[in-house]
Amino acid sequence: MFPGPLGISLAGKALKEGVWSLDAVDIRRFARDRHGTVDDAPFGGGAGMVMKADVLSAAIEAAAPPGAPRLLMSPRGVPFSQARARALAAGPGVVVVCGRFEGVDERVIEAQALEEVAVGDFVLSGGEIAAMAVIDSCVRLLPGVMGEPSSANEESFEDGLLEYPHYTRPASWTGPDGIERRVPEILVSGNHGKVAAWRRQQREEITRRRRPDLWARRQAARTDEEK
Ligand code: SAH
């Protein structure tokens, strides 16, 4: 599966240039029998299979560079965030463990001090796609990966606000509904101060409406003076 989509576009170019590197470890290589068994039935019964502690732990040992955080992709983990992506991107690297089946033996999580991370309140069939999301969000923050370094700072979540709406040519466009839509006048005014103020107001409006949770957190974090 790897590098998969991480091998193309900006992340892929940076991978080829050596800005970042990826070492995909096949857990099956660490199986202890000739069938390459990595999973077994759950103690206590129930549906599905569980990834074996001994096999998975050996794979993690082989992968883990000392000092790197060890994440386990898991729907019951802490929600992944832009702040976490920034912290990881500034660090020495990361080990990302991808679960399969029903999940992994709980004892590996304890023994390897795995930090459970979720990419959303939904269930994937494996941790790989979640891992790609995590890795991609980190890679694009590495110096030299994004075209314009400034473009990461006004983005959604960077300061607790969602992004403002974007427009490009043509300035007037008639969609399939037959309605002509013009770009907001202020964006073609050439007045940078007004454009900035409009974008700011849009970001606040969109955040308040779509993500009351983000808005409340932001309001709570700000001093009375800033509000
Ligand atoms: N039985 C588990 C789901 C297992 S899904 C439960 O009910 O919670 C199989 C694997 O996919 C998991 O071990 C995990 O690595 C990955 N996965 C699924 N959903 C995920 C999510 N939202 N975030 C991160 N990883 C996820």
Image (tube, grey):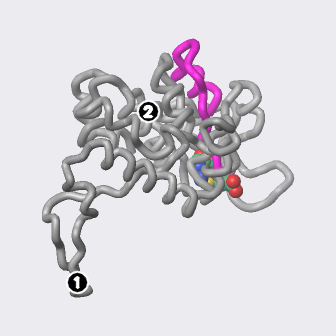
Look at 60% across and 32% down and name the residue there.
Answer: 71
User: Which amino acid, mark 1?
Assistant: Pro
**Position of residue 125 measured from the top left corner of the image (x, y, whole percent):** 55, 57
Of discs 2 and 1, which sits in the foreground? 1
- The quadrant holding residue 83 is top right
Look at 25% across and 55% down and name the residue there.
Answer: 187
User: Which amino acid, mark 2?
Assistant: Cys
Q: Secondary structure at mark 1?
A: loop
Please state if 109 lies on the left or on the right of 177 as rendered.
Answer: right
Look at 71% across and 32% down and name the residue there.
Answer: 108
Does residue 50 show up? no
For the C terminus, which image quadrant? top right
Mark 1 — residue?
176
Q: Secondary structure at mark 2?
A: helix
**Position of residue 64 measured from the top left corner of the image (x, y, whole percent):** 54, 20
Q: Which residues are magenta?
A: 56-75
Gap between marks 2 and 1 measured at Cα: 38 Å
Look at 63% across and 58% down and name the residue there.
Answer: 212
Q: Nearer the viewer, residue 27 or 172?
A: 172
Whichever of callouts 2 and 1 sits on the residue coming sooner in the sequence is 2
Q: Where 118 sits versus 72, above or below?
A: below
Q: Nearer the viewer, residue 200 or 30?
A: 200
| Tag shown at residue 138 | 2
**Position of residue 169 measured from the top left corner of the image (x, y, whole percent):** 14, 60
